[in-house]
Amino acid sequence: MNQRAMTITLIVIALAGLHLWAGLPATLRALGLHAHYNGPTYSLPGKRALIVTTSHASLGDTGKATGVFGSEMTAPYYEFLDAGMQVDLASIQGGAIPIEPDSFRWFLIAESDTRYLKDPNFQAKVASSKKIDDIDINQYDVVFLAGGWGAAYDLGTSAVLGKKMTQAWSAGKVIGGVCHGPLGLLLAQDATGEPLVKGKRMTAVTDRQVQQLGIPFTPQHPERELRAAGALFESSTAFKDFFATHTTVDGKLVTGQNQNAGYETAQKMILTAGGKPRTP
C-alpha cells in the first residue's frame, strides 16, 4: 500500500471511529436507556417531596466506587421541582451523597444529570443531605427511594428508614422509588404489622439485569428480596434488561423497574398525590 492509500485508509478509520463515538449515546437512547419521557406531566405547587438515597460508597471488596445511580436521583428531583414542589434530599448517614461514577460517563449520562452538573443549588443539597434519622416524614407529601448499587448495602437493612416508611404509609403519603430503591420498603410495615410490600404490586431492578451487568455479589437483590417478602413482582424485559422500563402503581405505592423509569415514576407519584395536568 502506497503512502497516499495508507493516509486515506487511516482517515476513513478515524472518521468511522468518530462517527461511532458521537453516535453511541443516541444509539443507547434508541435502545431504551434514559428514553425521552413523552407521557403526561403534572403540577403540585406548594407540596413537598423527599428523595432518599444510599450513603454506601464502595462496591463490595472490589474497591470500585459506587453510590446512587445519578439519574435515579436527578430525574425525580427535576420532575418534582418542575411540578412546583419543594424537594429535599436525605441519606442513610447524612452528609455528602456518593454518586456512581459510571452513571456520569459520556455515553450513559442522562439529560437530568447534565442539568444537575450546572445546578449549584442541587449540588449543595447533595453535598450536605439530611440524615434519615432527623427527618420528620410527616412534612412530606411524596417520598422517593433512589437506587444504585450502594442502596443494595444499606436501604434494605436500615431500621430507621423502615420506621420512617411505616410512618409515611400510615399517614397516607405517596411512597415509592426505582431500581434498588424499593429495598428501603423491606422493613416497613402496614397497619396490621405485616410487611408493607406483602401483597402489593411492585417492580424494581430484576435478577436478570443484575446478572447481565455482572454484579451478583451485593447483599440484596430487589426482585429476590421483594418476592421473598410477599410482593407481587412484575417487570418488563428487553434483549438486555438494562434497556427495559416499567412502572407499577398500586394505590399510593409507585415503583419503577430501573434507571430508565425515574421520569415516569416521579410523574405518576405526583399524579397520585393530587397533581393536576401541567399546561404545556
Image (spheres, helix red, strand yellow):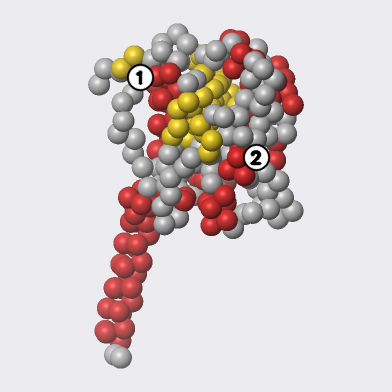
Q: Which residue is mark 1?
A: 42
Q: Is residue 60 above or below residue 11?
A: above
Q: Nearer the viewer, residue 234 or 32?
A: 234
- Corner quadrant of residue 78: top left
How far across and how far down the image is residue 143, in percent?
55, 21
Q: Looking at the figure, which quarter contains the C terminus?
A: top left
At x 30%, y 18%, the residue is 278
Query: Taking 94 as reference, is 278 left or right?
Result: left
Q: Which residue is mark 2?
A: 228
Q: Is residue 178 above or below residue 135?
A: below
Residue type, label 2: Ala
Q: Nearer the viewer, residue 38 or 235?
A: 235
- Corner quadrant of residue 240: bottom left
Query: Taking 232 as reference, is 46 left or right?
Result: left
Q: Looking at the figure, which quarter contains the N terminus?
A: bottom left
Disc 2 to disc 1, how far (Cα)?
Answer: 34 Å
At x 43%, y 34%, the residue is 247
